[in-house]
Amino acid sequence: MHRIIALALLIVLAQAGWAATANTEWKTRLPEAVRGVWLTNVASDALYSREGIEEAVKLCDELGINTIFVVTWNKGQTLYPSRVMEAFTGVAMDPALDPTGDGRDPLQEVIDAAHPRGIRVIAWFEFGFSSSHSANGGEIARLKPHWKSLNAAGELVTKNGFDWLNALDPEVQDFMTSLVLEVAERYEVDGIQGDDRLPAMPSEGGYNPAVIARYQREHNGKKPPLDSQEPAWVDWRAAILNDYAQDLYRQVKAVRPDLIVSFSPSIYPWSKREYLQDWPSWLREGNVDLLVPQVYRHRLADYESALQQTMAEIPANKREKFVPGVLIKVGEQLPSRELFEGMLAANRRAGLLGEVFFFYEGLSHFRESIRASYQAQPVRFPDHLVGEE
């Protein structure tokens, strides 16, 4: 009798082992793709409580989203308890996220909720080199007025309501890097991300005295042109930001070689002309692991055109680093279901199995469309992105 029981137990264990092996082998045969969403604290309540975070992560898991890009920096404040910011401004974190002073850490809460479900967490430094929105530079500019980015008239650079720091200033760059490295060192995030404000600066900027002096040293005393979009002047400033992208990449990798460095710039060449973002150079020079250009359009034909234009800038041997950003909510505006499904279909026709949605609050409106698309073609997270270059 004991032998029969032992034999039966061995059979059960063998079947379990075979099933686990088969499941692992099935997963490793799946194609790779990033399927992500940006999670922000603006026009969304998700980050304001642990319960909200858990609900958001649960929905992502249900839909098949494997990456959450969670905001960690905007409006001159961090969305995690920052020693850097506490030493600088006296405020460690946006107090709205912890109004009762209980010591919340929203970033850690997202990690704790997402990782057990196999969802990657990438810290998104949303405001980048912008220090405030319609606040004259905010507290940072008040404490460090010489950090402001100046236009040709010597005024603070403001574009689309965003107030800008001088991204060409080594002090400003060091400050931004200190925030990124703080997160890389203290949190088990899977990556960090800058967007259309990191590394970036409106091309109207760069007329600070120190920048002008540097330009003159390198151009036989000649002053920068007053035309802020004069091509050679754009190239010169964009090259400084290219160097910063390289420096940031190397410093992050020195802390954690496995950390994904991601950027989500505007569409090129508009990105370079308007914000000095020469992201094709970042790709060529190996300073980005995951590139998520913001292919934000409100008509399907425009989306398809912008997608093809973007892909034309990406060499075939770098294509695995690319995933498009798709706009699914801005203010109260949502794309039609026809447009939404058309954008996913355009991605698939282009050979792209993933995208990153802006932003989380739009997911519930397209729940069935996302689920149907993602279940039709399961994927696994592209582990080859981690620690490249």
Image: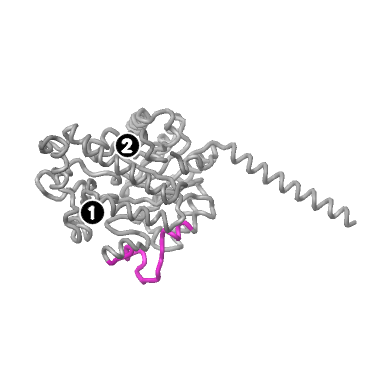
In-front residue for pair 10/199: 199
Does the image show residue 44? yes
Q: Where is residue 130 in the image (x, y as percent from the top left)?
A: 25, 51
Residue farthest right in this picture: 1
Q: Mark 1 belongs to which amino acid?
A: His
Residue drawn at x 12%, y 36% is 227
Residue bounds of the magenta highlight: 90-111
Quarter of the figure that contains the N terminus: bottom right
> Can residue 359 be seen in the rendering of this structure?
no
Secondary structure type for disc 1: strand
Residue 112, relative to residue 66: is it above or below? below
Which residue was labeled with disc 2? 279
In this picture the colour scheme is one colour
Identify the residue shown where x is 36% and y is 35%.
Answer: 285
- Residue 123 lies, with reference to residue 310, above or below; the image says below
The disc placed on residue 350 is none
Q: What residue type is labelled 2?
A: Trp
How many other residues sit within 10 Å of disc 2, few (<14), some (14-19) or many (≥20)?
A: many
The answer for how far apart the CA atoms under marks 2 and 1 are is: 25 Å
- On the image, the x and y values in percent for residue 102 come to 40, 71
Identify the element where label 2 is drawn: helix
Name the residue rendered at 64%, 43% in the picture: 23
Of residues 381 and 368, which is closer to you in this image?
381
Task: Say whether residue 95 is magenta.
Answer: yes
Residue 133: give its label: 1
Percent position of residue 198, x then y: 30, 46
**Could you tell me residue 225's position as x and y percent?**
11, 36
Q: How many marks?
A: 2
Q: Does residue 310 lie above or below 84 as drawn?
A: above
